[in-house]
């Protein structure tokens, strides 16, 4: 068993080198793939997300070779996420909100302001979020939303997670979320005490501004992120 795993790792390394040296093309590998993709395979999810980032130019922006670690979702958890109408996402380790803005062609003052606390991920952060164009819990304060998520074992959106969510929703559905409503960015701070409210204006331009967490509006809600209990 150990010898087989060693052979596997050596073979994968050889293939990776040949791809880097352009001795092999990705198209050459298709002959070994099934015509039917397994949408609930963690490896398929990882590969598809990795290719998406590479196509967008993440290696040019980050100036380093890019790869994603395997999502820690089981096949059953991926099926359950689909049944809950959730989208599977990943924020790459260490990438900044400014880099994500460049990657997704989104411009806004919050991506560079020192008043907005940086919340980069310390490792590749795989999560799911509702595949909806409007947030839940409209007309609730950020405090209420945070309290609800804590009770139900869910996490909030950081600005980095929200940017990935928006870009991926545009890619998959062709729609821009939060054009009529806005979303609390509950994982992060603005000027120490305030939080950001983010979304898009009528021209589909990204917009964000600071609110105190005890404010509420019928047009502002929350978006949760979910990770399995075993992570």
Image (tube, grey):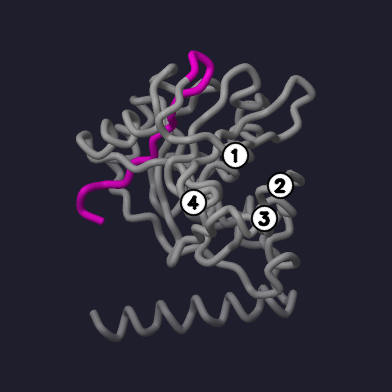
Question: Residues under labels 2 and 4: Cα distance?
Answer: 14 Å
Circle number at residue 90: 4
Residue corresponding to mark 2: 104
Give me the residue at 26% from left, 56% from top: 231
Q: Residues within 10 Å of mark 1 (few under 14, many from 20)?
A: many
Residue corresponding to mark 1: 168
Between circles 2 and 1, the one closer to the viewer is: 2
Give me the residue at 58% from left, 76% from top: 15
Tag 2 near tag 4, CB within 8 Å: no
Assign a secondary structure to mark 3.
Answer: loop
Label located before the other in sequence (4 or 3): 4
Which of these two is toward me, 72 or 162? Answer: 162
Give me the residue at 48% from left, 35% from top: 212
Between circles 4 and 3, the one closer to the viewer is: 3
Label located before the other in sequence (2 or 4): 4
Q: Position of residue 49 (x, y in %)?
A: 55, 51
Inspect the magenta stretch and tell me whether residue 229 lies in it: yes
Question: Residues under labels 2 and 3: Cα distance?
Answer: 18 Å
Inspect the magenta stretch and tell me whether residue 165 lies in it: no
Label located before the other in sequence (1 or 3): 3
Q: Residues within 10 Å of mark 2 (few under 14, many from 20)?
A: some
Q: Residue furthest right?
A: 203
Residue extent of the magenta highlight: 217-231
Which of these two is toward me, 191 or 80? Answer: 191
Residue corresponding to mark 3: 113
Tag 2 near tag 3, CB within 8 Å: no
Assign a secondary structure to mark 2.
Answer: helix
């Amino acid at each position: 068993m150990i010898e087989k795993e060693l052979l596997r790792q050596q073979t994968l390394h050889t293939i990776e080198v040949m791809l880097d040296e352009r001795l092999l093309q990705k198209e050459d590998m298709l002959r070994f793939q099934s015509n039917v993709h397994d949408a609930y395979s963690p490896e398929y999810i990882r590969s598809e997300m990795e290719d998406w980032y590479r196509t967008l130019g993440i290696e040019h922006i980050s100036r380093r070779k890019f790869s994603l670690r395997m999502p820690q979702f089981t096949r059953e958890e991926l099926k359950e996420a689909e049944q809950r109408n959730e989208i599977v996402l990943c924020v790459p380790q260490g990438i900044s909100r400014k880099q994500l803005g460049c990657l997704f062609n989104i411009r806004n003052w919050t991506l560079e302001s020192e008043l907005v606390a940086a919340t980069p991920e310390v490792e590749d952060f795989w999560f799911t979020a509702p595949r909806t164009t409007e947030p839940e819990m409209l007309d609730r304060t950020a405090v209420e939303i945070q309290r609800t998520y804590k009770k139900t074992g869910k996490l909030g959106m950081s600005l980095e997670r929200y940017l990935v969510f928006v870009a991926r929703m545009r890619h998959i559905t062709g729609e821009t979320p939060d054009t009529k409503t806005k979303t609390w960015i509950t994982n992060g701070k603005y000027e120490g005490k305030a939080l950001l409210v983010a979304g898009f204006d009528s021209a589909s331009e990204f917009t964000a501004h600071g609110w105190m967490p005890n404010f509420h509006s019928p047009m502002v809600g929350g978006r949760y992120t979910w990770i399995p209990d075993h992570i």
